[in-house]
Image (tube, rainbow, N blue to C red):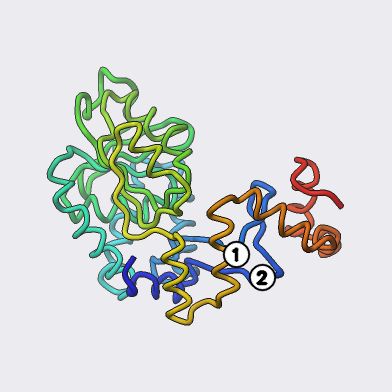
Amino acid sequence: MNKELANYLFETEALKIADPGQPFWYTSGKIGPFFINTHFLYGSANEADVLLQEIEQLADRPEEMPPRIAALCLRQFEQNLIYNAVIKMAYRMLEDIAAKVDFISGGARRDFFFSLPLAELLTKPHLSCYKDGRSYYSLPGEPAVEILSKQDSPIDNQKGLHIADIVTVASSFFRLWIPQIERAGATMSHAAAVLDRGQGGAVLLAEAGVSLNTLGTTNAEFFQAAVDMEQINSRQKEMCVAFLQDPDKYMADFLSDNPGFISAELAKGGKSAERAQLALDLGYARK
């Protein structure tokens, strides 16, 4: 990962590193030392939230979503230096790959921050994939049409490039996006993401015949570079690397070293208490 992208991640708070004594709660009921919201590279958390709300409001009008969101992304591309730089990095990375595929796909919702503008810039049709199994095909600047079966599919026997915001263990790919594309008669030959969390997703995709390209990986080398750039301290780096090596061991070790953590989180109330109770309910922690 180049320093420019690393700085953007910290500047927009797309990547946040926890204090050593106060890890982040994840929706799974587990804890970890860093949190990534790649879509904040749109420019800021506030700007990204506005676009996310627009995507959500268009959920019941999926035919209108691709041209509307692509237009907003391209306007931001022209106006925001960080988003402009990130999209240009992705364009350069994908230009040759795009020549080998017939369409670009993205999954609801955060993938659309990157898949839709890049489909426009690379002049490729876009397949908008929803978590309920719906797929909508659109040409650049035009309304989308739902693909109801392989028989009426405009991508039958075609190859696609799926652009995601981030890859962790690629669960969304195998649970949602790859099967969805295959039901439409196509194959996902390539995938791309802004970030790879370095937790095995790239290997799993390669084993499935999908080549993954990313702008960077949040691995041990990255966190050492962040120390060198004075974005984080050595203790934060150590806990991030420990988490990458074994997330469950990281959690077990932290709770062992901080026996009062769960009780303190329960006492806070709100989301902290909800996540702590979930950790207890699922057996990830004890009081």
Residue indicated by mark 2: 20
Neighbor class of circle 2 (other Cα within 10 Å; few <14, some 14-19, many 20+) is some
Q: Quadrant of residue 130?
A: top left
- The amino acid type, in three-letter code, at marker 1 is Met
* Quadrant in which the N terminus appears: bottom left
Q: Residue at x 22, y 57 (%)?
A: 93
Q: Is residue 91 left or right of residue 278?
A: left
- Above or below for 105 versus 67: above
Q: Quadrant of residue 237?
A: bottom right
**Residue 43 image offset from top left, x and y in percent:** 40, 71
Q: Which mark is residue 239?
A: 1
Q: Are marks 1 and 2 in contact (CB under 8 Å)?
A: yes
**Residue 6 image offset from top left, x and y in percent:** 39, 71
First reached walking from the N terminus: tag 1 or tag 2:
2
For the residue labelled by badge 2, is the local secondary structure a helix, a strand or a loop? loop
**Residue 147 image offset from top left, x and y in percent:** 32, 28
Q: Which residue occupies the foreground of this view, 171 or 131?
A: 171
Q: Is residue 23 left or right of residue 14?
A: right
Neighbor class of circle 1 (other Cα within 10 Å; few <14, some 14-19, many 20+) is many
Outermost top residue: 151
Q: Residue at x 86, y 59 (%)?
A: 263
Outermost bottom residue: 230
